Image: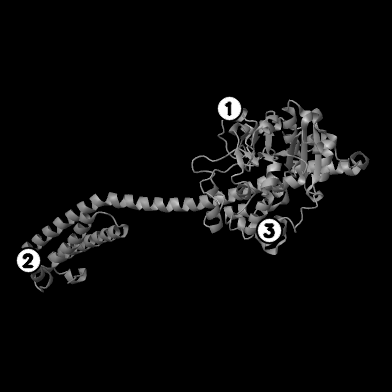
Amino acid sequence: MHRTFLALNSDPLKTRLDLIYKQANDHITLVKAYAAYARKLKLEISRQLKMFDDLVKNFSDLTSKPSYKSSLFETDGNLDEDVLRQFEKEVKDRVKFARLLVAESKENYDNQLKIQKLKDTIFAVNELLGKAKKNGAFASSIAAKSIPKSLHCLAMRLVGERISHPEKYKEELPKAEFEDPSLYHYAIFSDNVIAVSVVVRSVVKNAEEPWKHVFHVVTDRMNVAAMKVWFRMRPVEGGAYMEVKAVEDYNFLNSSYVPVLRQIESAKMQRFYFENKMENATKDGSNMKFRNPEYISMLNHLRFYLPEMYPKLPKILLLDDDVVVQKDLAGVWKIDLAGKVNGAVETCFGSFHRFSQYLNFSHPLIKERFNPKACAWAYGMNIFDLDAWRREKCTETYHNWQNLNVDRTLWKLGTLPPGLITFNSLTKSLDKSWHVLGLGYNPSISMDEINNAAVIHYNGNMKPWLDIAMNQYKNLWTKYVDNDMEFVQMCNFGV
């Protein structure tokens, strides 16, 4: 029975009883709150939880005792002071115990509250970090794939030079050396004039017999004029030979023969690579990577047609445009490939760079034919035995698998996965000093390893001609830039 102050104004003992009763109720509420919070946090303190529940029950039982109920709560007469004093003592004992229990538990509950707040903060920070990573990947992709102003300027200057002086840049007849099997032949496929010039200069400057080296550069229709003007204005040093052609000069490379060209022309493929690209990019970093049209460009897939592009050559060395050559490469042609088609440096270590990272082993065709633990190798510097290639019909193998992957279920992007498939069991592992990779993304490569390498490769987004290049590696590339070329100076390459 609850009493109010208005009902007790006539009896000081009743006012005292009401205060004692209110104090008991306040502590019951406090103990219940701690018990409820303990249950919410699912704390492993069953003993304390039981004590909370017992304490609440004790408070309730106290007011229900017959002696107190009849003498204090159900009487209309004066209260018995001795009984009230005994009730007050029992209430105060329970209040004291409640305070001790709350004080003992408060630190635990405060810590749990702090932990929960910390978890919420970590979750929120992780959400922000995820968004920042996606935005960073998108920005990095834009920086890596966009044409820098200096490169655009250089291409425009070179084309302008051709337009201004057409008589100086008439087409030349092919040289016999372009098909001479006794010379060292290189294939470089690129639309980047300055990058190609660095590759060529680095090969020639480190060659003991530069006059025995022949470079076959293939670019796209938009850049072929600029590429030809560059090498006419700045002929290759040391008597080396240079052939510059456009993809379109190879008539057999058409959609009726080349699966990639056929796939590019399909409406489904165009939607996948070109529609909503900007909208999807910041939502899914991996989706942005997979939708990069560079991976289905013909320049990227020319490497699968080397025997047909150069039918009279027995061997050719394929170089990417983001490499620098630091030693004489004549020794590469002397490597015995033991009947294999492709000589390449393997990149696997531990569980990294295995076939399982490049191919979809949940697909039955892949699972049946390949070993997920097989070691992957790298493009960038590859010596190809074209006679062995023709014998093994590697281009046909590539075509078969590329046709099977029209829906991108065997692999998602790039030329390395089909390369691993095409040259599976046909690749000879080269010594790692021939080709050191990672200068476009890994800041921790040993300088001893770099200095000992015949070829260093800036694979990754941080290309040496970009502002985002890593400074510790950039000078290894810039020292081969032809700074005496007037257009390089005019276009402010800042190298």
Choose mark 3 or mark 1, whichever is in front.
Answer: 1
**Amino acid at pointer 3:** Phe
Badge 3 density bin: few <14, some 14–19, many ≥20, Cα 10 Å: few
- How many numbered dots are placed on residues in this image? 3
Quadrant of the rendered image containing residue 468:
top right
Looking at the picture, tell me which residue is in the foreground, 418 or 140. 418
Q: Which residue is rendered at x = 68% and y = 40% of the image?
A: 384
Q: How is the image coloured?
A: one colour
Residue that protrudes farthest toward the top in the picture: 208
- The disc, 2 or 1, on the residue closer to the chain's N-terminal end is 2
Point out residue 236 in the picture as x, y percentages from the top left corner. 80, 32
Looking at the picture, tell me which residue is in the foreground, 191 or 414. 414
Looking at the picture, tell me which residue is in the foreground, 55 or 374. 374
Point out residue 132 in the picture as x, y percentages from the top left corner. 55, 50
Residue 274: which disc? 3
Quadrant of the rendered image containing residue 7:
bottom left
Residue 448: which disc? 1
User: Label 3 to label 2, Cα distance in Å?
Assistant: 92 Å
Compared with 464, 44 (above or below) is: below
Q: Which residue is mark 2?
A: 80
Q: Which secondary structure, mark 1?
A: helix
Mark 3 near mark 2, Cβ–Cβ under 8 Å?
Answer: no
